[in-house]
Image (tube, helix red, strand yellow):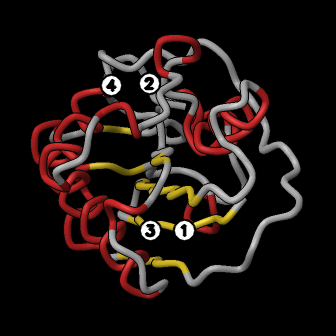
Amino acid sequence: MCHQKFCPTLIYRKWGWKPPMSGLSREPASAHTDGLNGQDLLMPGGGSKTTPISHESVDEKRHVLQLIEANASFRVAVRHFVESIKEAAQHNHVAVQDIDWFIPHQANLRMFQSMAKTLKLEMEKFYVTLNKYGNISSASCAIAFDEAVRDGSIEKGHLVCLPVFGGGLTWGSALVRW
């Protein structure tokens, strides 16, 4: 969850869980982590660092995502999204332009627009659910993917790219042949 104090532009309206996906191919993926800019997007609580969770750590809001440098995080996220998309395409011997759908982590529409511009893609190739659910964290790709399948946007044989970015910093992209 992103605390209002640290992410005033993000609103979590619904929470969801990853839907089961079947019939997917095992295409090579891209996954990375780098703590160099991790201080700009982090959750200081949780894990072994603050175990056990206490009333004090919850009161101090150590268990919510803190977006410290929004502009820096935005630029880093777009750069890593683009790099991981290109890397996943290269690993799979396909051109980025041959990918049918892009379903990124649903964080920010401007981010999608920057990715599309940098990759020279039409925005119509990006499946967007931000207007319905907002930024629902790690569930966003799975929910958007499920919705795209259910509404018929993704059809059998389509190649779908799922780029993600998260705190710490972590990022990657997977290609799925539906």
Q: Secondary structure at mark 1?
A: strand
Taking the spot 53% from the left edge, 50% from the top edge, the residue there is 45
Gap between marks 2 and 3 measured at Cα: 24 Å
Which residue position holds label 1? Answer: 174
Residue for badge 2: 3
Q: State how far apart marks 1 and 4 are (Cα).
A: 27 Å
Q: Residue 18: x and y, percent?
A: 78, 44
Q: Name the residue nearer the viewer: 4 or 18.
A: 18
Mark 4 to mark 3 CA distance (whole Å): 23 Å
Count residues near mark 4 (Cα–Cα under 10 Å), then give few for <14, some for 14-19, many for 20+: some
Lateral position of residue 100 relative to residue 24, left or right: left
Give the residue number, with chain letter if any, for mark 3.
172
Task: Provide residue 161's location: percent of width, then percent of height.
Answer: 50, 58
Type of amino acid under label 1: Ala
Seen in the picture, residue 146 relative to 101 is either above or below; the reply is: above
SS category of the residue bearing label 4: loop
Indicate the amino acid at tag 3. Gly
- Identify which residue, 41 or 46, lies in the foreground: 41
